[in-house]
Image (cartoon, rainbow, N blue to C red):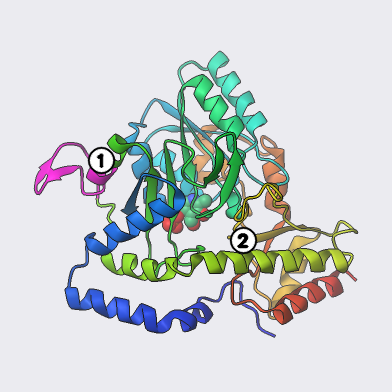
Amino acid sequence: MNIPMLDLKAQYETIKEEINEKVLGVMASQNFILGAEVAALEEEIAASSGARFGIGVSSGSDALIISLMALGIGPGDTVVTTPFTFFATAGAIARLGARTVFCDIDPVTYNIDPASCEEVLNSLSKKRRRLRVKAILPVHLYGQCADMDPLLKLAGKGGYWIVEDAAQAIGSEYPGRNGLRRAGTMGIAGTLSFYPSKNLGGYGDGGMVLTDNARLADKLRMLRVHGGIAKYHYKILGGNFRLDALQAAILRVKFRHLDDWQEKRRSRADYYTRKFAESGLEGSGLVKPPLAVYKGCGARHYHTYHQYVVRVKNRGRLQACLKTKGIGTSVFYPLSLHQQKCFADLGYKKGDFPVSERAAREVLALPIYPELTPEQQDYIVETIREFYA
Ligand SMILES: Cc1ncc(COP(=O)(O)O)c(C=O)c1O
């Protein structure tokens, strides 16, 4: 069997006619930049997320940059975030000349650990008054929300913004003090990515910022067109952060299928987890399936499984073995951000964030997509079982 880590062609086959028709419609209109398709997508995604505004932008990375820009974050400011995430999270902070301060993660969810965040914030306020903390940037990793209530409390206490990196978690729900909330709508702003591999992926780059704040939304709309208020009149310094009409049109078609795809991801994830229990791999501690921690709280999308990530023993050898058997896997992420060369000037060293570093050594993402069949999943679990046997 040959089971790729991701099979976008299989998905395209199921929606080909709808997509092609929409794409041809945009071609016929010859309107490519922003416009009606982008506005409609913004409305649809904001409404389903429960946010007042959606601002379509050029990528998930740019959604982060533009959100921090809109909040006026720059040199002299500090943003606290997780080291166990895709580069863009901390990259956005650094690009604006602000300082990234990391805290460790929770070993079960791999999301930012509120206790570690609190510790870091306390030490910053005591020792390093120079580092003006402006925001906390939690990431909803793999499709499961970070534990937002304690983070919101910390932010409220310290007067910090919360910007949520929801690139991997469109539609994921968090059961908090304020009821069931969707990823990206709990802080002042939340960012989404439409990178092709995401649960809602375009056919190119794209992203969105969600917010309830009308003034921030206006500023974001201005910033994405170079800071312009009218053609060739610029009020603030922005950039080209626009989402294009072709991507929006494609995303609107795909968005109609998203709920169905999310359910399918969930059922594939449950199937894996059941099989890992039945095979004895979980019991023996060789494979640790992901835990949907908010399960049972009534949330339908407590985890949207952007990735199905297991912790394993002998990861390198297992991954190589799976490859020879035709099974694609990935490691998200093999090196914590505090250990990346480009962040050397932050002064961190190996051992500073042990939970994150251990995760980086042990996690392995298995194929998960709506088109994955039980036969393929059985083959994957059986191959893993044989490897350990
Ligand atoms: C957690 C996280 N943040 C930010 C991004 C950046 O999104 P994009 O690739 O659309 O720029 C990604 C996407 O890969 C991501 O996974």
Q: Categorize mark 1 by other alpha carbons within 10 Å: few (<14), some (14-19), many (20+).
A: some
Q: Looking at the picture, tell me which residue is in the foreground, 308 or 38.
A: 38
Horizontal and vertical percent for residue 149? 59, 33
Q: In the image, is residue 27 above or below residue 201?
A: below
Q: Between 82 and 47, which is closer to the camera in this rendering? A: 47
- Disc ID at residue 218: 1
The residue located at (51%, 47%) in the rendering is 183
Residue 364 at x, y = what percent?
69, 61
- Residue drawn at the location 72% of the way across and 44% of the way down: 107
Q: Is residue 241 visible?
A: yes
In the rendered image of this protein, does residue 296 appear above or below residue 276? above
Q: How far apart are the two marked residues, 2 and 1, measured between alpha carbons?
A: 33 Å
Q: Secondary structure at mark 1?
A: helix
Q: Upstream in the sequence, badge 2 or badge 1?
A: 1
**Furthest residue toward left:** 232
Image quadrant in which the N terminus is located = bottom right
Residue type pointed to by label 2: Gln
Three-letter code, disc 1: Asp
Q: Is residue 229 magenta?
A: yes
Q: Which residues are magenta?
A: 219-239
